[in-house]
Amino acid sequence: MTPVRLFGYTDRLSVKPGETIQFHVSAEGTDTAEAQLVRLIHGDQNPAGPGFVEEEVACTANGRWRVEPQFTQVGSFLEVDDPEGRLAFANSFTLFAFIHPTWPASGKRQTIIGRWDGDRKQGYGIGIDEKGYLQFWIGRGEETERLTANVPLQVQMWYFVAVTFDAETRRATLHQVGVGNRYNGLLGKVALVDYESRTSATFRSKPGNLASTPFLIAGSRSRDAQQRARVSELYWGKIDRCGAFGQALQSAELDTIRSGLVPAMDSLVAYWDTSAGYTDRGIGDLVVDVGRHRLNARGYNRPVRGQTGWNWDGFTDCFRLAPQEFGGIEFHADALTDCNWKATKTVALPQGLKSGCYAMRLRSGWGKGVSEEHVVFFVRPGRPRARIAFLFPTLTYLAFANERLSFDHPEREALTGQSAALSDIDIEMYMRDDFGLSTYDMHADGNGVCYSSYHRPIMNMRPRYRMPSLDVASGLAADLSIIAWLDQSGFEYEVLTDEVLHRDGLEALSPYACVISSSRPEYYTERMLDATEDYIAAGGRYIYAGGNGFNATAGIRDGEPWIMECRRRDDGYKPWVSRYGEHYMATDGMRGGPWKVLGRATQKLVGIGLSSSGGGRSEPYRRMPDSYHRTVSWITKGVDGEIIGDAGLANDGAAGLALDYYDRALGTPPHTKIIASSGGHTDSYVVNQQLVLYSYLGLYGSYDWRVHADMTYFTAPNGGAVFACGSVAFAQSLPVNNFRNSASRVLANVVEAFAGASRLPGLAWVNEEKQWA
Amino acid sequence: MLPLEYDRSEDRDIIVRDRFDGLRREFLRTLVNPEVIEEHRQLPLGQHSERLERLLIYFRQRPLEQRYAVRAIEPFRRYQVVKLSGRRGVPPRLIDDAIYTSANDARHGLFLRCIRDLLET
């Protein structure tokens, strides 16, 4: 009997009361599920806190839902729009492409370009066989005839490949020529490798042409057990300019194409100029045929564009500077940016819904076999009314979505200083290939994943989730500790998301007197960063309630907020690194990597920035001399003694996981006060790579003073201010002892002051403060 | 990066790596004693002696398919020790029937398994 499993996602992540939201659910082992709308209040099941807390909410959609298994097309490819079947060749033809395979000997067949139906054995294609050899094949329904190159394709090297087929003689010739230069591939000129092959064969027949077969780039048509059309034989690697002629070209003509020119011949059917249509602010998913038939190709699961091409000479590092050298489109057979499941239910949310984090809780099965899924979304207010907003870091959730570092990344355990603690959902996620990867993972060909999406189930955006590599509640589950704290505190608040902040900019924040960040607001687009800076400068009061914030660049394409892009480079922590020349985001043309390198260190925005990170034991803060200053002593009012945050759900202390520190050299505002600092961190905590020029022995907690967290405060123009907690673990110290603890006391003091209508305490002391200085 | 499952049988540096590993293991075996085992039992996570830290650093750097992990059957209540597959899509496998009632106990069970591997090979 199939175990009962339920998985789901929503079409939108941020909604308002009264709006509709679509739920896309896939079910295994059941055809019904009990749905219940819930507001999520706390997630972490650590017994030192309140445990998992949700509140059932009345909704017309509550009740029994019919559910079914849904199909997910995994893998990126292009489908050519060819309604008149111009690529259904009845006579002679030529296919050509520049290719850069990243996993040629994958053990599976790959299609580069073709009009091929693998189940019906109809059509033609040029691709790579199981052992990594270039191959051309045709079929008319009964057998497949193949012509194979006589030297294997080398991994990460550029080739020009072509096949000519003469329908009269049925003679096929397959050409393979290496076009590597000093920069564009893995191996240099000194490597004694044979790149060239030219093989010919006389076939018994001509290709068949089914009307239903699409012309695909990086995949071919097949069907699943239910005879539903799908795409398989997916390609790993880059494809640059490619095309087709309605005649068998001569060698000299192929040489012309290989030189970068395309003969102006009437027989040209399609020429996909993969570098056409680029703008400085991004590249879309449409690949243009610049031939006369305009047989454009549309990307699925977002092929990676703007990559270095076959003719890239290494002089420029960005597609914006020389687009003609950046025609590479990268494909991965395990890419996924949209499950494209049918909508299971369209739900009109209740009008009076309180702003917060919600989920449709789905349950099916009995006893130990019960399956429960929380399909999470966020309800912002219809019209802002509260003085406080909590900002859910949905972009950071996306960056980490379905990460599997504990299984796949050889350095993860060394980084956290502890063995992974895997849950069953982690193991299930690792075994499945239909939920996609995170931007922390690598595709199976070893290249980093630069797109993540919420149009798929996200196992680690669930209320109880614990990150296995750190064995602590993480992401949403950690941020709910702030929500639970706000709920019990009596402060009236509303919630926002990164998605809204990116779209609406300053307008999203400006209605609020006080904005509270999440525990790890790590990924920021330029618009989000600008809006936050403008909000504070205009008098907004900002609480940076975490660590490792505002650190990494990210991109979101207008109109498609469910996909985020991340390129990795330079001196930031990085699970992989983009190849040289591929550091710029295809989404918006921005340079990827850490914001610090772009002149926007976190310290410039909120006073502190990443100093170090690690795992295992967390530490408390100790009050620093500034905290006794009359301008800021109100922050620690009610705290007994020197210690702040000596307990927590994340390794028993408020300073842990990732720590931020004050650094004038990185832009901490001059008048910033250090309220408290942590210390005594273990050697599992290592100084942030961004802060050192060399690696050397001793960059660890017990050796280097920089391994600590600073809790800081500064006043900003127009009555604004920033309070920064300094650590990812801070939020998880709030719920301890039923929210009665020193970390909770400090945060309450700050929120009360920030949300108040009056001037901040201490501002009246400006003149006297000057005398003290 | 090369493909995750790239055939490395022709990589010559495996010989160098294995030679280094052999010498390293030989030295690390001299560090194992009852005191270091007891230190880990008392404090699986935290600041460790150099002797223990050297052992732990080595265990964290083993090839993925030789590494162990803790499986949380029920967080904060029941744990097991499993061995990673090192191959995407292949789940970790259970190595014995031992059930631990805390994550730290399981971490120590995992450590003992690593010590056994070190001493036996």
Image (cartoon, rainbow, N blue to C red):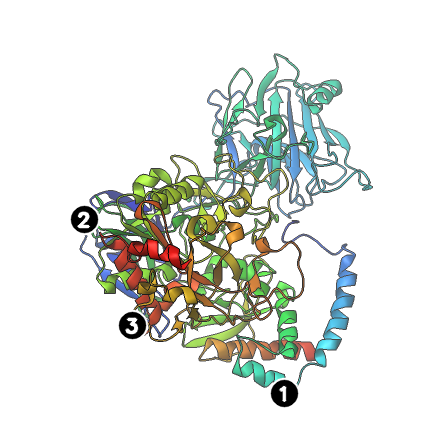
Residue A727 figure quarter? bottom left
Please tell me which residue lies in front, A564 or A682: A682
Real-space Cα separation, disc 3 to disc 1, in angstroms = 42 Å
> What's the mark number on residue A350?
2
Q: What is the crowding at mark 1: few (fewer than 14 residues within 10 Å), some, or many (at least 20)?
A: few
Reply above or below: A711 against A529. Answer: below
Specify whether A613 is left or right of A127: left
Q: Residue furthest front?
A: A771
Real-space Cα separation, disc 2 to disc 3, in angstroms = 34 Å
Regarding residue A623, the answer to whether it shows in the image is yes
Q: What is the crowding at mark 2: few (fewer than 14 residues within 10 Å), some, or many (at least 20)?
A: some
> What's the mark number on residue A740?
3
Residue A306 figure quarter? top right
Specify whether A239 is left or right of A393: right
Chain ID at mark 1: B
Real-space Cα separation, disc 2 to disc 1, in angstroms = 63 Å
Per the image, the residue denoted by label 1 is B34
Q: Amino acid at mark 2?
A: Pro
Is there one chain holding both mark 3 and mark 1?
Answer: no
Q: Position of residue A30 (x, y in %)?
A: 33, 57
Specify whether A63 is left or right of A370: left
Q: Position of residue A563 (x, y in %)?
A: 43, 42
Q: Position of residue A129 (x, y in %)?
A: 66, 41
